[in-house]
Structures are given as structure tokens and as C-alpha cells.
Image: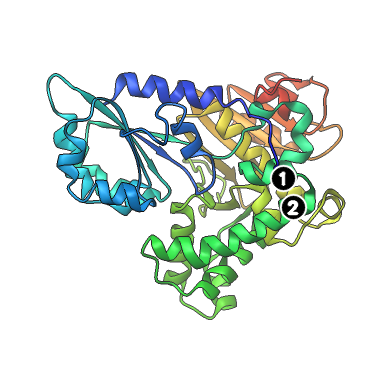
Amino acid sequence: MVYTFPMIDRRTDMQQVRAALKRSRVVALLGPRQCGKTTLAQQFVPADSLNYFDLEDPDSLARLSEPKTALHPLKGLVVIDEIQRRPELFPLLRVLADRRPLPARFLILGSAAPDLLRQSSESLAGRLETIALEGFRLSDLGARTQPKHWLRGGFPLSFTAWTEADSAIWRKQFVQTFIERDLPQFGVTIPSVALRRFWAMIAHYHGQTWNAAELARAMAVTEPTVRRYLDLMTGVFMVRQLPPWFENLKKRQVKAPKVYIRDSGLLHALLGIGDRRELEQHPKVGASWEGYAVEEVLKALQPDDAYYWATHNGAELDLLLFKRGRRIGVECKRTDAPTLTPSMRTALTDLKLDELHVVYPGKQRYPLADKVNVIPLAEFVGAKA
């Protein structure tokens, strides 16, 4: 049987890429493996075009055996997929991007931010614009898909699987393949068993402040080692480190980052959660919802800067966002009817928030206080009903 899946409208991503290509000579589309970068790029340049290079395809690698000869004559838009596999291309791209008049622009796709940005920072300085691409947003899918999207996450093949069991199997295999095959191809030499154990431990710390000493003891390694693991998983878009915000306040403030598994579906796979019933009964359900909401809010608002805030006295704010000179607070609550808490009042006053939004899974919007509103997550991120 041949399975066919509905085409998901990724208009927002298409518009971002199109606008960037008008502004910049080289655009980098960065995101995790299997998130849809290749599919999106092929909306601009078909895979069978001479202007499309997939660096995991032997034919493309053969065509690029003499890169200047292959790339110099091309006109229009040129796509190079998995660019971090050939870092020696960056100096050539600088030369090609500096031609006048400019015969070609370049859309380069990468799955490992540190490798890509480190190699390109000098070669393409002032010429490169980066766009982050993750899996499907809730706003791409519609409000009615929220329970399914939360459970399965945003990876296209996980979300579109026929059954929850099929989705769970895909995510389990993704984790295994990513650690055993993909990371070594990026030059990672850390044993796969150690990384698999670390990733699972981070899933249990999801939504908590980073504690290197505790994880180092649990894994019987040094604190710098677990820090290196964390930075690696952050760089390949699997983990988010949300930095703390601290000001010159009299209160003692938390100064360690919060850690999240970025995709809720992968979090559930690492926690052994297979279906909605298991998710609802799991002790990490509240933390899972918080991380899911944090990711959707960040993708929707695209703030200039994002932090969390917490004091040692118990006051906290899930997100402190800076956008166009405004301070926006966001609390993520998995409850039927959120109410105003002392922590919210403290954050509103101490952080001088211009507005505070409480996002939750419900369907009704209502005010809590001056500058404070409860808003359904789907409405907040612009998902259609």
C-alpha cells in the first residue's frame, strides 16, 4: 500500500526564505535533520536541477569534485544541502557572492549550527543571512491539531504517521539513528551509549535549571564533559538552553540556564510515552506542556531576545521576551482556568513588563488584571480554528 499524506502549508517559512533571498546573497536555512529543510528548498529549486546539490548524494559530490568549475557558470538560485559536509566551499561561496553583476544567489542548508557558523563566520561575514527552520508549527497545522501536535511533535514524518504507534516507532528510530549515524558523520567522537544516556537524562530534567554537578555524578564523568555534551546537543538543535535574566535587584536570582528537549515528540519518545493516555498520566506532563508552549511561542513571536527569570524566593517567569523595545512576559500553564498568582504580580512589577500573557490549552480568552491576559496557546500563536 502506498501512503499519501496531506501537504502542510508552510507559507510562513516560504515567505521568510523568499524575503531573505531578496536581501542577501547567501541564505543559510538551519535546522535539525528531518525537519523539512530539503522539501522546502525544493519548492524553490527542483531536486533534478543542475542548480541543486545534495552533499549526501554521490552524484552531487561527483559534480562538486571541481567546485569552482561546477558552481561558477550557474545562474539564478543555487541550493547546496548539508553544506557542513564540505566546509571548504565557504571561501569559494564568498568569491561567487561578491561578483558584480551577481549572476547567482545561494541557499545553503545545514543541520549542525556550530560547524556551519564557525566555518562561515569569517568567509561569509556580511554576506550571509540565517533562518531557523524547525518542524511543523502549530500555526501551520491549525488549532484542532494541538493535542496530536503536542504528543507527536513537529517532525513531518512523526506528525503525519498513520497511527500513534507508527509515530512512536519513527521517533524511537530517529533517536537511535541520530546518535549512531548522524552525529558521527558530523565529526562527533563521543561514544553513542554515553550520548544516548545523556539525552535520556536531559529528558528527565526537561524544564529544570541546569545542574552540571548532579548530571556529572550520575554519569560518572566530569562537569566539563557534561557541559560539552549539552553544548553539542544544543548545537544540533535537539536541546534548548534558555538563559536566565538577572538585573540589579535586591532579590537573589537564579543564574543557571533552563534546559528543554526542543521537540515534544522526541521528549515523549525519550520518556517512553507512547500515547495520549500515557502522556496525561506521566509525572512530566506539566513540564512537557511548558516546553511545548515555550517552543511554539518562540517560533510565533520571533523575539529579539528570550530569557526565563527566577528568584531563590520562588518567584519565576517562564519567558521574558524583548521585542521592538517592549518587555513581554509569558507564563505557560497546563490548567483549565489559570488565575493570577503572587509570582505573576512580582514578575510584572520587578521586571517592569509591558504585558504579561498566560497561555494554556483551553479555548477561552479572558483578562486577569491590568496588563495580564489569559490566552489559548493556539490563539496566541495564530493557529486557525
Whether pointer 1 and pointer 2 mark residues with C-beta atoms closer than 8 Å, the reply is: yes
Q: Earlier in the sequence, mark 1 or mark 2?
A: 1
Name the residue rendered at 52%, 69% in the picture.
195
Name the residue rendered at 60%, 57% in the picture.
174
Name the residue rendered at 72%, 61% in the picture.
271
The label shown at residue 381 is none
Q: In what element is the residue under mark 2?
A: helix
Colouring convention used in this rendered image of the protein: rainbow
375 or 344, nearer to the observer: 375
Q: CA distance from mark 1 to mark 2?
A: 6 Å
Horizontal and vertical percent for residue 31? 47, 43
Q: How many marks?
A: 2
Residue extending farthest to the front is 1
Q: Is residue 88 above or below residue 326?
A: below
Q: Is residue 232 above or below residue 216?
A: above
Name the residue rendered at 20%, 23% in the picture.
103
Q: Quadrant of the C terminus?
A: top right
In this picture, residue 381 sits left or right of residue 35: right
Q: Which residue is mark 1?
A: 161
Residue 318 makes an appearance in the image: no
The label shown at residue 166 is 2
Horizontal and vertical percent for residue 321? 53, 31
122 or 49, nearer to the observer: 49
Residue 107 sits in which quadrant?
top left
Residue 157 makes an appearance in the image: yes
Horizontal and vertical percent for residue 232? 44, 59
Q: In what element is the residue under mark 1?
A: loop
Q: Is residue 141 above or below residue 220?
A: above
Q: Residues within 10 Å of mark 2 (few under 14, many from 20)?
A: some
Horizontal and vertical percent for residue 330? 64, 32
Query: For the residue marked with disc 2, what is the amino acid?
Result: Asp
